[in-house]
Amino acid sequence: MSTKIQSIRGMHDILPGESGLWQKLEATLREIIQSYGYQEIRMPIVEMTELFKRSIGEVTDIVEKEMYTFSDRNGDSLTLRPEGTACCVRAGLQHGLFHNQQQRLWYMGPMFRHERPQKGRYRQFHQVGVETYGMDGPDIDAEIILMSGRFWKALGLKDVTLQLNSLGSQQARQAYRGILVDYLRQYEDELDADSQRRLDTNPLRILDSKNPQVQTIVAEAPRLSEHLDAESREHFDKLQDLLSRAGVPFEVNPSLVRGLDYYSRTVFEWVTEALGAQGTICAGGRYDALVGQLGGRATPACGFALGLERIIALLEQEQQSCQNAPHIYMASMGDAAAEHAILLCEKLRDQEPRLRVQVNCGGGSFKSQLKKADKSAALATLIIGEEELANDTVVVKAMQQQVEQKTVPQADILAEIKQIPGILDD
């Protein structure tokens, strides 16, 4: 007996009963992003491995442990994209989008990391990313943060809070790194294995440790904010002022450093306590050196990415759903009526407002067709039999209200449908 083939661990099917909420979320995000004048870019899901080593950093957990990397038939090392920013920069450089230009870009799609699967953390996950290039002031930082804050309002999500920090310039951060390492060396034996390894490779990540003992040590460490360069401090002060004037509450979190090497100056996260350990639902900041790091001219850049699975989990906790049920279910009796029903529904789909119409196919008794109509959650069922076909009429039956069914001329169907509560709501 053959083994049953199932999906790969940490990579999930999104079933028909779930996809409606995904579509609602994606449409909401797309509408808000485009209202700010951003344009969509679509990149491949497979890139040269070197792209991520040079951008994310060879000593990060993502590159060291989590990437899906393989050699193709030509012997090239390829990687399923673990994040989108490096891909976006590669595309911008390849197609000349950055030189003497400003760009506001966004994308949506799957990312891949070989992590230990748990709630809110999967091996295939979906992100929406927003990227801006060619603008170096705090105004664009504020814009993308205000945009992301607008998401939560539109989705009706509560208890989502904004955390901010500044990492300063690369030069200031490098100087601080030495100060931090000198401090942590005193407690090296008390650090966990991950932090001991990072002490020589990526010590700023130790500030972000979730280990309680390490957190106690870090709490007394010198603050990065005390070692910012003057330009970064002014940039951060102006950003905080803009957000305050826009009425956006925030908390400055000196331990917020982000997990990717390319960040500088502003970093931010939107967090919630409703998802336990996986509480970050949107994160980003500035990466002014990344374009130059990948071979282009120095170009200021900032952006963010948000995880769709985590936001879906929040929406489900608040019992939000969206089934995308048909407005109309069309039932028929007899071969001639069934053929006519298909053509009539095509005409209905041509009308405005655009209707979702599902036609019964495959025959079945009248009783079974009504059961299918009820299961579809349609707001109304149209019925055509031999008598209706002969008289050029149709029976209209509202499914969700206690209203008697009506027989109306086929020419009046649309007007009758519009009277049914809920038909025009979406």
Image (spheres, grey):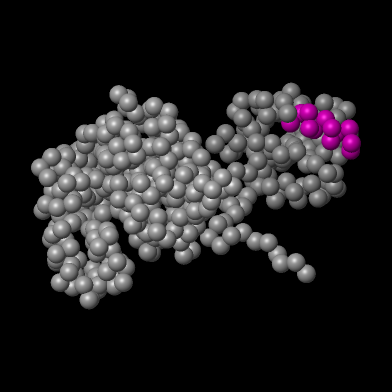
- Which residue: 51% across, 40% down? 44
Please say whether residue 344 is one of the residues in the magenta stretch: yes
Question: Residue at the bottom extreme?
Answer: 189
- Is 114 on the left-hand or right-hand side of 167? right
Residue 303 coordinates in the image, percent (x, y): 33, 40
Please say whether residue 34 is one of the residues in the magenta stretch: no
- Is 91 on the left-hand or right-hand side of 348? left
Image quarter in which the N terminus is found: bottom right
Kindly indicate the quadrant of the structure image that contains residue 146.
top left
- Which residue: 38% across, 32% down? 93
In this rendered view, identify the residue nearer to me: 208 or 28.
208
- Which residue: 49% across, 55% down? 68
Kindly indicate the quadrant of the structure image that contains residue 139.
top left
Kindly indicate the quadrant of the structure image that contains residue 147.
top left
Residue 375 coordinates in the image, percent (x, y): 70, 51
Which range is magenta?
Answer: 334-345
Image quarter in which the C terminus is found: top right
Question: Residue at the front extreme?
Answer: 75
- Which residue: 46% across, 61% down? 115
Secondary structure character of the magenta stretch overall: helix
Residue 131 coordinates in the image, percent (x, y): 36, 37
Q: Is residue 36 among what the camera can see?
A: no
